[in-house]
Amino acid sequence: MPTLTDIKEICVNVVSDFSRTLKEEREIVMPEMHNANEITRNQVIAKVVSTVLGVAASFTLTYLGIKWLTDAMDPTKKEKKLAQAEAQKMLAKLGVKDPGKLSDYELCVAANLLDPRSVEVTWGSIGGLDETIENIQETVILPFKRADLFRNSSLLQPPKGILLYGPPGCGKTMIAKATAKAAGARFINLQVSSLVDKWYGESQKRAEAVFSLAVKLQPTIVFIDEIDSFLRSRSSSDHEATAMMKTQFMSMWDGLTTDPNVRVMVMGATNRPQDVDAAILRRMPSQFYVGMPNEDQRMSILRLILQNEQTDELNFEQLSKLSDGLSGSDLREACRAAAVAVVHEYLQSISRHSDDYGDVGDFRRLNMSDLQTAIHKVRSTKAMQSRTFQSSFPLD
């Protein structure tokens, strides 16, 4: 029978053998577990990398898809590209070598640049507005050509805005064209359509680009024809986008006064000055009324229109009295109608079956009867339009 000492020795040996067995198994299993951990970590890293690449590819494809859809849905994309290409050509034509890097918005506005050399209207092309032309030359032309005369005092700074107003057809746009040719400055014939964009907030950026471009190209004149259609009186019924565009335009315009050396001027023309916003009128301190011509002015306009035409001896004083109430454009239309009547009379006088119409030398000269008939015709047309307007849109 084993004693207590033998039992203790047996237990010690069993425990020792068990411990040695566990140690050996652990030594065998640990490398396998280490290799298993290594494989799992590599797999995890590969999984993370593939996931990141997949997400990046997904975002890229989504972005490209949305961008393609946005461009496809934008009806003005083609016009924008054409405007930018036209702007680059015009800048090169004007000799603008380094205007700085222009943004896409500024390039869209630059498409409205006008080459003064392509303008055929000069001061000599405008009749009967000598006093107005003299004031324009002193107010607009002189500050751009002789900027040194306006640097000694803040009171001598040229105005930031000029308004031409008066009845339609009296020469406001012609004055603007002549100013563009004579000022020796960059001339932006701003079209309101170039400021409108379908995307929210883009119109404000384009309005800002008008002045940022003008500053880069200074000296610059920004001309807005029919300014009442764009900067008319604001009201609570205005669309939010339109109101924001007007506000941005006025804010940038007013900001020009912070730098007295900036030579940027805004010129507007309208036949409805009462519809222009009061804040805009404040920014146009120099205002010139271009009204209906009087008798002497009509005589001057008729002489100017007919100076290169083949005419008989004309009584311009009588024609001037006969054309009372007609504007400059009405007088040009009357002269055109008289010339067309001469051609029409010539065509009726020859055989209808003949293809030989002769040459210009076969036309007879314009005479008093032709002009009188044409003036009566224009006057009757204006009277009929006036009666139609009053009957369709009663004023009381």
Image (cartoon, rainbow, N blue to C red):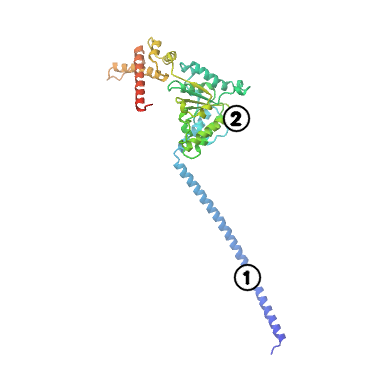
Of badges 1 and 2, nearer the viewer stands: 2
Mark 2 lies on residue: 258
- Checking the image for residue 271, the label placed there is none
| Quadrant of image for the N terminus | bottom right
Q: In the depicted view, which residue is nearer to us: 189 or 317? A: 317
Residue that sits furthest to the right in the current view: 5
Q: Is residue 48 left or right of residue 353?
A: right
Q: In the depicted view, which residue is nearer to us: 379 or 274? A: 274
| Quadrant of image for the C terminus | top left
- Secondary structure under the numbered disc 2 in the rendered image: helix
On the question of residue 216 being in view, the answer is no
- Secondary structure under the numbered disc 1 in the rendered image: helix
At label 1, which amino acid type do we have? Val
At label 2, which amino acid type do we have? Thr
Q: Position of residue 256 (x, y in %)?
A: 57, 29
* Tag 1–tag 2 contact (CB < 8 Å): no
Task: Classify mark 1: residues with Cα within 10 Å, few (<14), some (14-19) or many (20+).
Answer: few
- Looking at marks 1 and 2 on the same chain, the residue that comes earlier in the sequence is marked by 1
Task: Classify mark 2: residues with Cα within 10 Å, few (<14), some (14-19) or many (20+).
Answer: few
